[in-house]
Image (tube, rainbow, N blue to C red):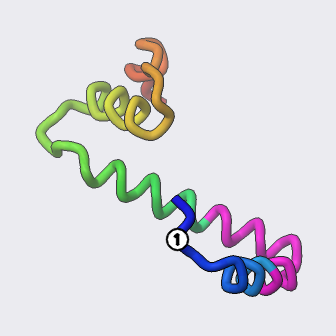
Amino acid sequence: MKDTSPAINAMMFKRIMALTDSERFLMGMSMLETSRTLVWNSLPATLDLPSRRRLFYQRFYGQPLPDEVATWAP
């Protein structure tokens, strides 16, 4: 969906590109962390950990999580 005018898009791009590489990287990592938190918190808390991991992975990455990863424990 493109609902932002080209002028605003250009202004936003210019401001983001004015940041240092490190600042842009940290901004991206912060957005990733936020989106992962939103997805994780949207899952039913009553599910066991392997089931939550499977559902999270499916929602976030769009493909099934292998069983050996879902049941892994440190």
Taking the image as shown, residue 3 lies to the left or right of residue 14, namely left
What segment is highlighted magenta in the picture?
Answer: 14-29
Q: Identify the residue shown where x is 46% and y is 57%.
A: 35
Please tell me in which quadrant of the rendered image residue 67 appears.
Answer: top left
Taking the image as shown, residue 12 lies to the left or right of residue 68, namely right
Q: Residues within 10 Å of mark 1 (few under 14, many from 20)?
A: few
Please tell me in which quadrant of the rendered image residue 59 appears.
Answer: top left
Instruction: State the residue in front, 15 or 24.
Output: 15
Residue bearing the label numbered 1:
3
Taking the image as shown, residue 19 lies to the left or right of residue 58, namely right
Q: Identify the residue shown where x is 71% and y is 70%.
A: 26
Residue found at the very far left of the displayed protein: 46
Taking the image as shown, residue 8 lies to the left or right of residue 30, namely right
Q: Identify the residue shown where x is 76% and y is 66%.
A: 25
Q: Secondary structure at mark 1?
A: loop
Give percent across and percent down for residue 65: 45, 21
Residue 46 colored in magenta in the image: no
Tell me: residue 6, above or below residue 28.
below
Main secondary structure found in the magenta portion: helix
Give percent across and percent down for residue 54: 35, 26
Instruction: State the residue in front, 49 or 4.
Output: 4
Residue type, label 1: Asp
Give percent across and percent down for residue 61: 50, 34
Tell me: residue 35, above or below residue 24.
above
How many dots with numbers? 1
Residue 23 colored in magenta in the image: yes
Residue found at the very far top of the displayed protein: 67
